[in-house]
Image: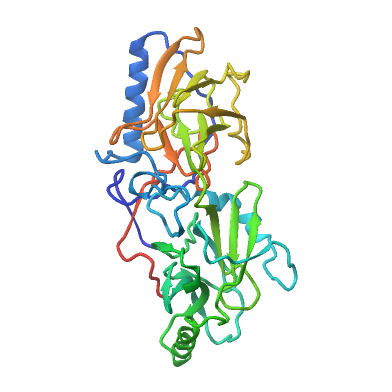
């Protein structure tokens, strides 16, 4: 895959979560307003020094439900999101060992298999691919695909997902899956639609040409061996759910493994906060809170982690919540080291008045000595240095303590990404 680094974004972005940093304590006390302003200015300077100048059009909401991508609950669409421009990719690295340990051979383990419903509303993000043996060992498959056939016409939903026999590709590390597209398919007309999972081969040999021609000849015919009739569902300890597909009809379902989310239900955002405990701390784990709105517009917040040691008041919409008020020890860091539980619930409470479009959330930090409010941090305006960012919860795990977001957490995809020759 081709990636080009750029100074804090213009256009398409992805948030990648990885990197290691040494651990150390944080939390100075503040005695005067001027001291607060000095630390704020130092934070801004250090952020720009580390990540580069900020484009004035940069938004700090990285969720794929913001702006024009917002979906109304119940829309009759099947969403397949491939390398979403606002995709945070840290989840795959944290789940990879569990995913690799699963038995994907249906003849050996028949658990977790589900019948495929072509008229569904789901967001699928390819996260892993491990090629398996096929009926023609002379062909080195280079790509796997998920597609939809509508009224006799096949549309490739996943571009070319790179695959190599017995080799695990994933979306989070250096061994990137090769795919770069986003498709939205209306599946309301179930009578005229079905899905396919199939392989293609790279190269210029006659065997390769013959194989690809044979695959293409059967793709649009109902009942062909590449028609999706079932899939394997795997839920890992993080709470994330994956759907696994067999693309070469050998009964092994590790060819394409997608993160799966229900597209019909809720709007959710994860807010990750820095609390000015230090001017060079960019782990964004001082407060990690998920805010969720269901199809009936009921809202709730779930506090996942608190890596800061200053007390705070978290205001979401009309609701206020504080670390000390909920009887947590203010100076204790929760669920940020050494091995966080990604689905842990530290606290859960109802919220009213949250606006997902405007991100009406603030954090008021208290002085560690006096307990007085010293600064209120709003969701950042476009182009400002951020102390709060919004990400999609399922996609983005928070950083460990004092593990900064990596220097290249902003990247731009080069035009034409998605085609790799082997």
Q: Is residue 186 above or below residue 84?
A: below
Asked whether, in this view, residue 13 is left or right of residue 137, the answer is left
Q: Position of residue 62 (x, y in %)?
A: 40, 44
Nearer to me, 89 or 227: 227
Determine which quarter of the picture holds residue 108.
bottom right
Asked whether, in this view, residue 384 is left or right of residue 20, the answer is left
Nearer to me, 148 or 332: 148
Q: Which residue does the image show at 60% across and 72% down from the upper left?
A: 229
Q: Position of residue 265 (x, y in %)?
A: 52, 47
Q: Is residue 334 above or below residue 83?
A: above
Q: Which residue does the image show at 43% across and 43% down from the upper left?
A: 406
Q: Which residue does the image show at 45% across and 48% down from the upper left?
A: 88
Q: Is residue 232 above or below residue 220?
A: above
Asked whether, in this view, residue 69 is left or right of residue 129, the answer is left
Q: Position of residue 240 (x, y in %)?
A: 59, 50
Asked whether, in this view, residue 9 is left or right of residue 328, the answer is left
Determine which quarter of the picture holds residue 322.
top right
Residue 369 seen in this snapshot: yes
Q: Is residue 300 above or below residue 208?
A: above
Outermost residue to the right: 108
Q: Which quarter of the rendering shows the C terminus?
A: bottom left
């Amino acid at each position: 895959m081709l990636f080009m680094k750029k100074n804090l974004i213009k256009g398409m972005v992805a948030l990648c979560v990885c990197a290691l940093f040494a651990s150390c304590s944080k939390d100075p006390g503040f005695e005067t307003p001027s001291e607060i302003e000095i630390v704020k200015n130092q934070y801004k300077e250090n952020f720009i020094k580390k990540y580069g100048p900020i484009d004035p059009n940069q938004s700090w909401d990285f969720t794929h439900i913001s702006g024009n991508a917002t979906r109304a609950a119940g829309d009759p669409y099947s969403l397949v999101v491939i390398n979403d421009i606002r995709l945070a990719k840290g989840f795959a690295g944290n789940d990879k060992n569990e995913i690799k340990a699963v038995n994907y051979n249906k003849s050996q383990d028949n658990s977790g298999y589900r019948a495929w419903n072509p008229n569904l509303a789901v967001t699928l993000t390819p996260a892993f691919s491990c090629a398996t043996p096929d009926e023609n060992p002379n062909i080195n498959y280079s790509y796997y695909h998920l597609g939809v056939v509508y009224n006799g016409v096949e549309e490739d939903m996943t571009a070319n997902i790179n695959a190599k026999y017995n080799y695990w590709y994933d979306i989070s590390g250096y061994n990137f899956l090769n795919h770069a597209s986003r498709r939205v398919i209306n599946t309301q007309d179930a009578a005229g639609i079905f899905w396919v999972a199939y392989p293609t081969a790279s190269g210029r040999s006659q065997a390769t040409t013959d194989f690809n021609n044979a695959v293409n000849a059967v793709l649009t015919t109902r009942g062909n061996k590449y028609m999706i009739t079932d899939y394997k569902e795997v839920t890992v300890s993080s709470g994330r759910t994956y759907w696994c597909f067999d693309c070469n009809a050998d009964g092994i379902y590790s060819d394409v493994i997608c993160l799966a989310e229900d597209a019909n239900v809720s709007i959710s955002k994860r807010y990750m906060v820095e609390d000015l405990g230090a001017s060079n701390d960019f782990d964004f784990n001082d407060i990690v809170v998920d805010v969720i709105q269901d199809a009936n517009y009921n809202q709730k917040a779930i506090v996942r982690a608190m890596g800061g040691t200053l007390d705070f008041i978290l205001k979401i919409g009309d609701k206020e919540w504080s670390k000390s008020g909920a009887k947590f020890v203010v100076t204790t860091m929760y669920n940020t080291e050494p091995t966080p539980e990604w689905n842990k619930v530290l606290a859960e409470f109802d919220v009213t008045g949250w606006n997902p479009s405007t991100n009406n959330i603030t954090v008021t930090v208290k002085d560690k000595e006096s307990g007085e409010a010293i600064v209120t941090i709003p969701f950042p305006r476009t182009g400002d240095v951020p102390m709060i960012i919004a990400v999609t919860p399922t996609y983005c795990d928070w950083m460990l303590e004092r593990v900064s977001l990596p220097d290249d957490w902003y990247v731009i995809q080069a035009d034409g990404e998605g085609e790799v020759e082997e």
